[in-house]
Image (cartoon, rainbow, N blue to C red):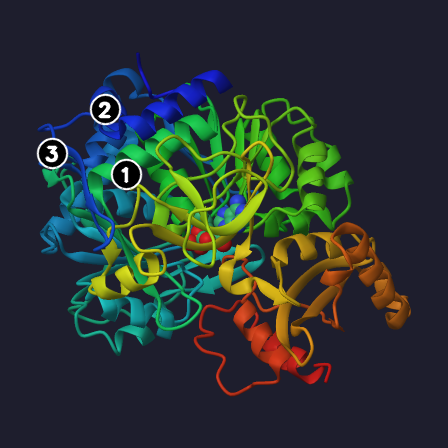
């Protein structure tokens, strides 16, 4: 019996039970049958959840790029591995076959070696969404260098702090990039960042915009001439299962960004397995994840997961609004995309626009539509399901984190019945539990608590770069012996999970534990409301009361605000109960969001409390100017 693919719900339960009862047999068999290894492992898993130590497949020798590319060449050499869809609709899309990808990655890997990069060295990649980004990531992995991809929208100081933290030896960047109607400069940002980064000796520069840029002698090199000269024969480095594969920085709510470290074999097995099952991947499907490779979603579901399965994956350089709001839908049609994976923030933004943008496409190819990154509210779920999925494609609302490496709780397409706003069931291998305030596990269904995982899964991050103590403190100290996700969740009557928000976002009003997501959901359903965010603020009687920041749809602006506030509160009462009513409602034109689309609630919380002293690290904000506006409009 193979465990790699789940075909129906009954089989899901069988596999799930097997993964709990005999995790070593379960993952051992998957690893053995679906990947190529230089040498087998001694132990499938060893762990100590109190000290935050986890090892998967220790003793094994493997190279993830051999698994992503080389092993497919016999059967799929001429198959398209990557479809590159450029920002400009007039620029032709590129189809890169597995043979071509092999050649390009091998050449790049040889260039890195010639430039002195060895196994274990850190390489910062700061590139727009172009094929060279994928090639650079894979070239690092081929020679055992640890890639640290930094989203090419971060500022010089944000890049610098990430380079310094992991002491990168090299940066791979480009002159610039295209995003919508804008041309973005990247090299000048790296120049500024590197003034503070003595560890970097080489900068490889890809030409994308042909902008005139400064090249520092002895440090900066255009990469194309080196690639032209490089051999396309590159022996892959033989890696230990637990050798680091990459570092990816994720911003915490406080303090400096955390360099999450993912290692080779466990991440490989987990990203491949979850891709196959959540999206019901079949040979010849065309998979499109709209994330940037600078986020974990892009690492696992643009690159590693799809390539490990020999799939065709789309890399999109542009934005959903350029040249107009039909771009996503047009690309699905153009490339016959079968699985489409995006974020609630994009879904909500597109749902605000005319339906005509969507309805002009029949979406015949589409089979599965997915979401990730934050709760997918009920209204957005239905819009996505009805108009993009045509009520025919399962909506897979996938819950996971940078730290988990791959999807943890999600419907498996065509296997798990979906339910709006629910991430549904944990994947095999994921032993999810809810914990109460006394740190006891909550048994039974129809319960709410802090979401923890009580057994390691192969994709778990192993540490924070250079700071294991912080890793242990953040994830393993609150509920000793368990991994704490930081999220709160609800388990319904059949055991489906709904993520209700970060635990920090739970507000206790008059002793009632209120997650912010369901309240926001209710508010967003009001016809005049486009988006909202709720935080708690101290209240003499209730302990905490609720403060709502609300963005109105354009049509709503003419309305009387007092009446509207009453209506919104009645709406909440009807959906959740009077206890969840907002004490203060402030109408705003925007919300402070991170570049990955998450609302930075700690800033809103501070404003609600009237405390402007320290907003913490705001370097990841997309729209810092909104903070002033919100401060000025604060309701006393
Ligand atoms: O709060 C959860 C939310 O995003 C957090 C993880 O963020 P990040 O590390 O940036 O990774 C995002 C992409 C994997 C989680 O702790 N989150 C993610 N997916 C969902 C979600 N909240 C609700 N529903 C989801 N599907």
Q: Residues within 10 Å of mark 2 (few under 14, many from 20)?
A: few
Q: Residues within 10 Å of mark 3 (few under 14, many from 20)?
A: many
Q: Where does residue 321 sit, x and y in percent of width and height?
A: 63, 51
Q: Which residue is identified by label 3?
A: 60
Q: Secondary structure at mark 1?
A: loop
Identify the mark nearer the N-term, 2 or 3.
2
Q: Where does residue 450 sit, x and y in percent of width and height?
A: 47, 53
Labels 1 and 3 touching (C-beta < 8 A):
no
- Point out the frontmost of discs 2 and 1: 2
- Point out the frontmost of discs 2 and 3: 2
Labels 2 and 3 touching (C-beta < 8 A):
no
Q: Which residue is identified by label 2?
A: 25
Question: Which residue is pictured at 60% across the width and 35% down the height?
Answer: 493
Question: Which residue is pictured at 8% across the width and 36% down the height?
Answer: 59
Q: Which residue is identified by label 1?
A: 458
Residue in front for this viewpoint, 112 or 144: 144
CA separation in Å, label 2 and label 1: 13 Å
Q: Is residue 350 visible?
A: yes
């Amino acid at each position: 019996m193979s465990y790699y693919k789940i075909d129906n719900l009954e089989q899901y339960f069988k596999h799930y039970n097997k993964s709990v009862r005999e995790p070593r047999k379960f993952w051992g068999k998957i690893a053995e049958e679906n990947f190529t290894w230089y040498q087998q492992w001694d132990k499938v898993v060893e762990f100590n959840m109190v000290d935050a130590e986890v090892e998967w497949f220790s003793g094994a020798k493997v190279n993830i790029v051999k698994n992503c590319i080389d092993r497919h060449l016999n059967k799929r050499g001429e198959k398209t591995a990557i479809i590159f869809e450029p920002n400009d609709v007039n620029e032709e899309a590129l189809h890169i076959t597995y043979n071509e990808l092999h050649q390009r990655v091998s050449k790049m890997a040889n260039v890195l070696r010639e430039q002195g990069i060895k196994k274990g060295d850190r390489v910062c990649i700061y590139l727009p969404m172009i094929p060279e980004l994928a090639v650079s990531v894979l070239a690092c992995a081929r020679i055992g260098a640890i890639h640290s991809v930094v989203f090419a929208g971060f500022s010089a100081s944000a890049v610098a702090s990430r380079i310094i933290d992991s002491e990168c030896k090299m940066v791979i960047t480009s002159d610039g990039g295209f995003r919508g109607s804008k041309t973005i400069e990247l090299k000048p940002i790296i120049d500024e960042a590197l003034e503070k980064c003595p560890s970097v000796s080489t900068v490889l520069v890809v030409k994308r915009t042909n902008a005139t840029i400064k090249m520092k002698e002895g440090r900066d090199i255009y990469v194309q001439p080196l690639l032209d000269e490089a051999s396309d024969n590159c022996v892959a480095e033989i890696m230990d299962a637990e050798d680091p594969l990459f570092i990816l920085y994720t911003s915490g709510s406080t303090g400096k960004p955390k360099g999450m470290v993912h290692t080779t074999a466990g991440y490989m097995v987990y990203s491949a397995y979850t891709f196959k099952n959540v999206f019901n991947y079949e040979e010849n499907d065309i998979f499109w994840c709209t994330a940037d490779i600078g986020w974990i979603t892009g690492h696992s579901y643009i690159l590693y997961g799809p390539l490990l399965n020999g799939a065709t994956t789309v890399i999109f350089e542009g934005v959903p609004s350029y040249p107009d709001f039909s771009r996503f839908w047009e690309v699905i049609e153009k490339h016959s995309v079968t699985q489409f994976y995006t974020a609630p923030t994009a879904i909500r933004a597109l749902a605000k626009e005319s339906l005509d943008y969507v309805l002009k496409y029949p979406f015949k190819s589409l089979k599965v539509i997915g979401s990730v990154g934050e709760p997918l509210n009920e209204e957005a779920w239905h819009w996505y399901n009805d108009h993009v999925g045509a009520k025919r494609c399962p909506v897979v609302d996938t819950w996971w984190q940078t730290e988990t490496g791959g999807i943890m709780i999600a419907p498996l397409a065509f296997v798990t019945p979906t339910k709006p706003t629910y991430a549904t069931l944990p994947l095999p291998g994921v032993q999810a539990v809810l914990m109460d305030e006394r740190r006891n596990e909550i048994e039974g269904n129809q319960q709410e608590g802090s979401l923890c995982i009580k057994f390691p899964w192969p994709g778990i991050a192993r540490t924070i770069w250079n700071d294991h103590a912080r890793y242990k403190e953040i994830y393993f100290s609150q509920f000793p012996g368990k991994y704490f996700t930081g999220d709160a969740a609800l388990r319904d009557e059949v055991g489906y999970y709904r993520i209700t928000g970060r635990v920090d976002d739970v507000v206790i009003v008059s002793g009632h534990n209120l997650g912010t997501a369901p309240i926001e959901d209710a508010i967003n359903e009001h016809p005049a409301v486009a988006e909202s965010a709720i935080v708690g603020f101290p209240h003499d009687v209730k302990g905490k009361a609720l403060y709502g920041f609300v963005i109105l749809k354009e049509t709503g602006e003419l309305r009387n605000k007092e009446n509207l506030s009453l209506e919104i509160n009645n709406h909440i009462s009807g959906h959740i109960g009077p206890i969840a009513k907002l004490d203060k409602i402030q109408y705003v034109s925007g919300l402070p969001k991170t570049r990955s689309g998450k609302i930075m609630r700690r800033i809103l919380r501070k404003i609600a409390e009237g405390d402007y002293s320290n907003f913490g690290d705001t370097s990841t904000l997309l729209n810092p100017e909104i903070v002033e506006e919100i401060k000025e409009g604060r309701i006393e």
